[in-house]
Amino acid sequence: MTEETELPASMGRVARRELALQGLTRLEQFDGMSESALLAIHGVGPKAIRILREHLESRGSALRP
C-alpha cells in the first residue's frame, strides 16, 4: 500500500482498526460511501469522517451525506 491510499494516521487508532475489521483499509474504498453508514461503525465519529472527507476531496473523490 502506498501512503496516498492508506487510511490517514490522523484518524486515530480505534477508527482505523474498526474500519479495517470491516475490510476498509484503502481510501479509494470510501468513494461514494455514505457518512451515516460509516458513523454506524463503532469507533468512527465526526472527526474520522471529517478527516476522510478532506483526504478524499484532495483526490477528487467524496463521501455521500
Image (cartoon, helix red, strand yellow):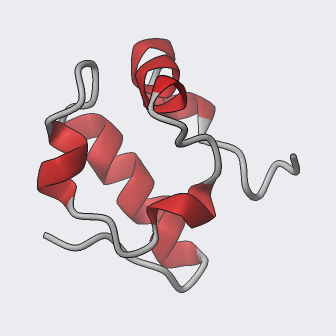
Residue 52 place in picture, x, y as percent: 42, 53
Total numbered labels: 0
Residue 36 place in picture, x, y as percent: 11, 52
The residue furthest right is 2
Residue at image position (45%, 61%) is: 30
The residue furthest bottom is 60
Q: Is residue 44 above or below residue 6?
A: above
Q: Is residue 48 above or below residue 51?
A: above
Is residue 8 shown left or right of residue 47?
right
Q: Is residue 3 above or below residue 41?
A: below
Query: Of residues 55 and 15, which is closer to you in this image?
Result: 15
Q: Indicate the quadrant containing the C terminus: top left, top right, bottom left or bottom right.
A: bottom left
Query: Of residues 12 and 32, which is closer to you in this image?
Result: 32
Residue 41 place in picture, x, y as percent: 24, 30
Instruction: Examine the image and state in which quarter residue 20 appears.
Output: top right
Residue at image position (88%, 51%) is: 2
